[in-house]
Image (cartoon, rainbow, N blue to C red):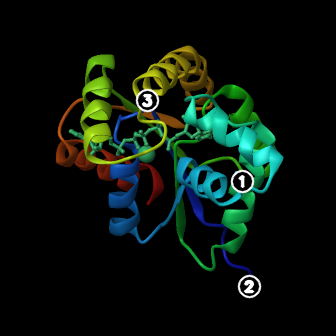
Amino acid sequence: PSRPRPKVILIIGGPGSGKGTQCLKIAERYGFEYVSVGELLRKKMIHNATSNRKWSLIARIITNGELAPQETTITEIKQKIMKIPEASGIVIDGFPRDVGQALSFEDQICTPDLVVFLACSNQRLKERLEKRAEQQGRPDDNPKAIDRRLTNFKQNAIPLVKYFQEKGLIVTLDADRDEEEVFCDISMTVDNKMY
Ligand code: UP5
Ligand code: MG
């Protein structure tokens, strides 16, 4: 008999809302595969920016805090998912960013089983990103790009959340709290909705 398709959880939220942090915890607790879309794009851009015109353009887009082209992003996700061997679940970090991407994901990949929105105040998002910028060197953790990422998020978040609300797929959690509290809510949600 064929295996059931892996459950798919999408984690969305502003830059610095804790998507990466919480996704790693989910992957660990549930044995799910972790796919960070931002990480996929950053790796590919670093690898290809000097030799390939398309990727040098995308590198510029991402470093400025703007969104990479939708079709490229979906293609990267598809390729990554196809390489995942056997998994009971996949947790996807930082995708979709807008309704267009959500539609195209459903069209080309699948309807997600659950979407978690990490709701975080603008002030907190900024604080966390500025702190991380001091500690690490992500190319888009510069003041101008941080501003663009926050602005783009604010523009796209409401319609995106509404879209998944209408489908009854989304749970919104208060992500202003500390990591452990947020994760406690996430695991309750996953236990309730998916098992
Ligand atoms: N931290 C985390 N949780 C905390 C908590 N509860 N309390 C206190 N501190 C907390 O966390 C950020 C920082 O805060 C860390 O230092 C952490 O320790 C601390 P993190 O878990 O890294 O938050 P995250 O939401 O993952 O923040 P990130 O900066 O990664 O969010 P972005 O959405 O900006 O980044 P992403 O990698 O998803 O996307 C980057 C870029 O890729 C986009 O801007 C875009 O250019 C491109 N992209 C696309 O074009 N299309 C896509 O579909 C996806 C990405
Ligand atoms: Mg992240």
Crowding near the residue tagged with mark 2, few <14, some 14–19, many ≥20 C-alpha atoms within 10 Å = few
Report x, y in % for residue 19: 40, 44
Report which residue position mark 1 lands on.
Answer: 50
**How many numbered badges does the structure rendering display?**
3
Q: Earlier in the sequence, mark 3 or mark 2?
A: 2
Residue 95: x and y, percent?
58, 41
Q: Secondary structure at mark 2?
A: loop
Q: Which residue is at the far bottom?
A: 1
132 horizontally vs 147: left or right: left
Establish whether ligand 1 lies closer than 8 Å to the Cβ of label 3: yes
According to the picture, the residue beneath numbered tag 2 turns out to be: 1
Q: Earlier in the sequence, mark 1 or mark 2?
A: 2
The amino acid type of the residue labelled 1 equals Thr
Disc 1 versus disc 3: nearer the observer? 1
Which element is circle 1 on?
loop
> Crowdedness of circle 3 by 10 Å Cα count: few (<14), some, many (20+)?
many
Q: Which residue is mark 3?
A: 14
* Residue shown at 80% from the left, 42% from the top: 71
- Image vertical order of residue 110 relative to residue 116, above or below: below
Is the residue 137 above or below the residue 32 in the image?
A: above
Q: How many angstroms separate mark 1 from mark 2 (CA)?
A: 46 Å
Question: Which secondary structure lies at badge 3?
Answer: loop
On the image, which quarter does residue 134 sit in?
A: top left
- List x then y, in percent, for residue 144: 46, 21
Is 132 left or right of 103, judged from the image as shown? left
Q: Foreground mark, 1 or 2?
A: 1
Most distant residue in the front direction:
50
Residue type at mark 3: give it: Gly
Mark carried by residue 61 = none
Q: Nearer the viewer, residue 52 or 188?
A: 52
